[in-house]
Amino acid sequence: MNAHRKICVVIGSRANYSSIKSAMRAIQNHPSLELQVIVGASAILDRYGSVVNLIERDGFKISSKLYMLVEGETPATMAKSTGLGLMELPTIFTQLQPDIVLTVGDRFETMATTLAAAYMNIPVAHTMGGEVSGTIDESIRHAVTKFAHIHFPASRDAKERILKLGERTEDVYLVGCPRIDLVDEILKTPNTSIQNLFETGVGERFSLNEPFILVSEHPVTTEYGAGEKQISTTLNAVAAINLPAVVLWPNADAGSDDIARGIRKFREQNKAKNMHFFKNLSITDYVHLMKKTVCLVGNSSSGIREGAFIGTPVVNIGSRQDSRERGENVLDASHEQNLIEAAIKKQIQHGPYKSEPIYGDGKAGEKIAQILSKCEVKIQKRITY
């Protein structure tokens, strides 16, 4: 290892970025570390909001861009996208010569990043390992754990699972979730410009000081083909509550076209007059919306993680977050309109919940940078018993 360690972070989606931004900032500011940033997959595409522009506006220099997303958003194209990433990343790693590759969570680009680095004998650091959930993400997350050399779990339960997978105790650091760092920071800063987002939005204008619902629903890869029906059920349930709603576009996993089609049909049927749709929101705007909303509806992990810390009432729909550790702020519902409506009404009646710091105390990024600056890594993996 060099005395001045080069830490390479690979960003493939808006979720990736918000999940590692505070660690990137801490690495960039650390005197013993050099930050390298690779941006690829949906994070560089306009149809997903050009997250790369947000990254650059936040003051991060892009070391390389990676085009790896095969159009179609099917299980087959997701596998092919992983393969493209695995073909292209070794060339970029050869050029950048990182000392450690830091990868995030459980998406297909995470799998490509991990395999490329591991085959090249580059130590892999992994955030958010050890958690359980639905979809193919569950398998990817645990597979990455077995390739990774340094582990940064976000919760105590996650740390225990990593240890049960046979990882060395000295390589597992309970740091919390870097996303919570941003939430903690954002909540301390008033956002006076967020209302401007809705000046040219679809539908009727509304004030964020009035009750509104926030919707964030993504495809479930193990239920491929069901996305259109699922999002239609959700939107009909939200419309029945008769409150304004902010609806986010889905991520780039297999099945996102189904959800996008469901959203478009809903709008074409003139059911969305009181809804506003966004491809992408900055993490600052999204957190303030979570703080203000009367209920977050959908299947995003943000309802589980940020929601617990903020105290946001959440209706979690379907299997995407199955078994993920959660707070009292979450009510689960299946994909049935009457059950979703009932859960939303119950959450609105309850109001905000108390904060539960299940996923960290707001210092994860600083802890990660400090550990990366001095930890010793053994490239040869061994299962402990």
Image: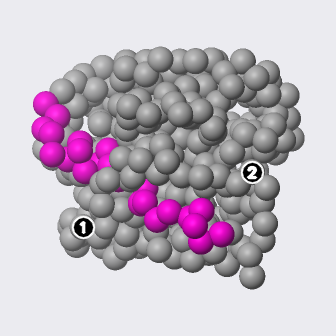
Q: Position of residue 47 (x, y in %)?
A: 58, 23
Q: Horizontal placement of 306 versus 171: left or right?
A: left
Give the camera-side residue of 159 and 7: 7
Q: Quadrant of the N terminus?
A: top right
Is label 2 in contact with label 1 (beta carbons under 8 Å)? no
Q: What residue is drawn where x is 20% and y is 35%?
A: 206
Q: Which residue is mark 1?
A: 355
Of 86 and 215, nearer the camera is 86
Q: Nearer the viewer, residue 302 or 367?
A: 367
- Quarter of the image for residue 170 reads bottom right
Measuring from the top left, give residue 139's x and y in whole percent. Answer: 74, 61
Relative to 60, is 199 on the left or the right? left
| 14 lies above or below 115 | above
Q: Earlier in the sequence, mark 2 or mark 1?
A: 1
Q: Is residue 339 left or right of residue 112?
A: left
Q: Quadrant of the C terminus?
A: bottom right
Whether residue 172 is in magenta: the answer is: yes
Under circle 2, the secondary element is loop
Q: Which residue is mark 2?
A: 379
Asked if residue 38 shows in the view, the reply is yes
| x, y percent for residue 145 | 69, 60
Specify whether residue 82 is painted magenta.
no
Which residues, given as a range, are shown in magenta?
Answer: 168-192
Does residue 343 appear in the picture of this structure? Answer: no
Query: What element does badge 1 sit on?
Result: loop
What amino acid type should be assigned to the residue bearing mark 2? Ile
- Tell me the crowding category of disc 1: few under 14, some 14 to 19, or many 20 or more residues within 10 angstroms, Cα based: some
Q: Kindly identify the amino acid type of the residue bearing the numbered disc 1.
A: Ser
Residue visible at 47% across and 17% down in the picture: 61
Question: Which residue is pictured at 79% across the width and 28% down the height?
Answer: 90
Image disc number at residue 267: none
In the image, taking residue 256 as reference, residue 37 lies left or right, namely: left
